Amino acid sequence: MKKLFYALALLILVIACKEAPSTSIATESAIITPLAKARIDSVLQQVVDSKNVAGISALIFEEGKEVYYNAFGYADIAANKPMDRNTIVQIYSMTKPITGTALMTLYEKGRFKLDEPISKYIPEFANMSVYDGVDEKGNIKTKQLDREITIRDITRHTAGFPNRNDIPGLSTVMKKADAMNRENTLTEMAQKMGETPLWFQPGTQWEYGPSVDVQALLVERISGIPYGNYVREHILDPLKMSETRYFIPVADRNRFAKLYIRKDEGILVQDTITYDNYTEHWPLTRGGSGLTSTLDDYMRFTQMLVNEGQLDDIRILQPETVQLMATNHLADSITERSWLPTKGQVGFGIDFAVRIAPPKTPEENNGTVGEFYWDGAASTLFWVDPANKLTAVLFVQLFPYDQIGLHKKFRDAVYGPYPFKD
């Protein structure tokens, strides 16, 4: 199978060299060689041809230069609209690192310390309790906190906020509270979360959830500026990310990709639910999701990170702050980590997964030690590889999240299957 893969990749490479397509950038590169470009093209074309993806695009920079771009398939199948460089997509949790960056601009100004309790700034969390199961009648039992939730907890997902629908009693309470209703403000969100017991003691487990939405409110409370305005003024506008937005104006909606739900092998159904999340102004400006973006816009964010907080002549963060964010903050004592181990040999920093060791098996996600990254619910992905000065952004609009091993295939195409053998 591997020999067939390489044979196909080499055939594509030969054709590419003869035709010299405009999507291939002729640049000296250590990682994105001509063979790597052929592998990437092959992988992206295959997932479209199999009808498991409607459209897909990728952009890669190395040493500050574009070394790969291509797009395949359709942003809108019904309209016969191709996926391209200017396509706008829903990035979901790729919003989180942008929020974390906004928060850390305030950290640099000395406005808070990571190990302070969040209740110092958000008193809605001053009287939290912890879930302790249910009694014989199904009523929730609670116990006291061992310690308060800290700001570090909400940057690394150890706060204890419930985020599952199968916790007896607690999931029902969480659903009734409906803290993430888009009609809520961030303050109303916090009020409802503050009245819902935590699932576990802060700092004892890693559990993905609404922590970054709390970060957005923290930015709002500390800065005195509405979160949407703050992130625009301090991150997006300085980086010239004009197309990274919570709201898509009418003039740009023809570039907004449809989202597709994969029902089975080769069967895609267009989503009809999420579209108006971005075509109306909603009170809730979530820090954990909600932004849309383009390949080039998001690449500017990743380039700022790989350049240790600076892009062109604009400095967003100091190098030591980026390093702090890209450092694993999960102690070995935090052994319950939900699905994080499925990401490979990673810990978690401030709103990024952080690779702490190379893959142990060929089945694991490929990557280099020191890489930091995240992805989105619609199967989008980005990473920053400081060792190779490489940044990659993969855009697709696919639900449920990556059931086809797309991220693994893409990473292998970039770096070569691990362990790589000629």
Image (tube, rainbow, N blue to C red):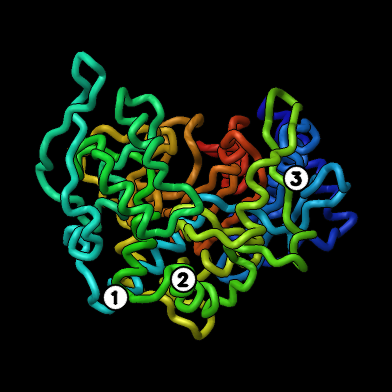
Query: Where in the figure is residue 377, as x and y percent of width and height?
Result: 55, 43
Q: CA distance from mark 1 to mark 3?
A: 40 Å
Q: CA distance from mark 1 to mark 2?
A: 15 Å
Q: Which residue is mark 3?
A: 55
Q: Nearer the viewer, residue 39 or 286?
A: 286
Evaluate whether residue 369 shows in this view: yes
Q: Is residue 41 above or below residue 95?
A: above
Query: What residue is at 21 percent from the left and 32 percent from the top?
Result: 131
Q: Which residue is mark 2?
A: 231
**Quadrant location of the C terminus?**
top right
Q: Which residue is mark 1?
A: 108
Q: Nearer the viewer, residue 94 or 384?
A: 94
Evaluate whether residue 9 shows in this view: no
In the picture provided, is 233 more to the left or to the right than 279?
left
Query: Where in the figure is residue 399, as x and y percent of width and height?
Result: 62, 36
Query: What residue is at 83 percent from the left and 51 percent from the top?
Result: 82
Amino acid at the residue labelled 3: Gly
> Quarter of the image holding residue 186?
bottom left
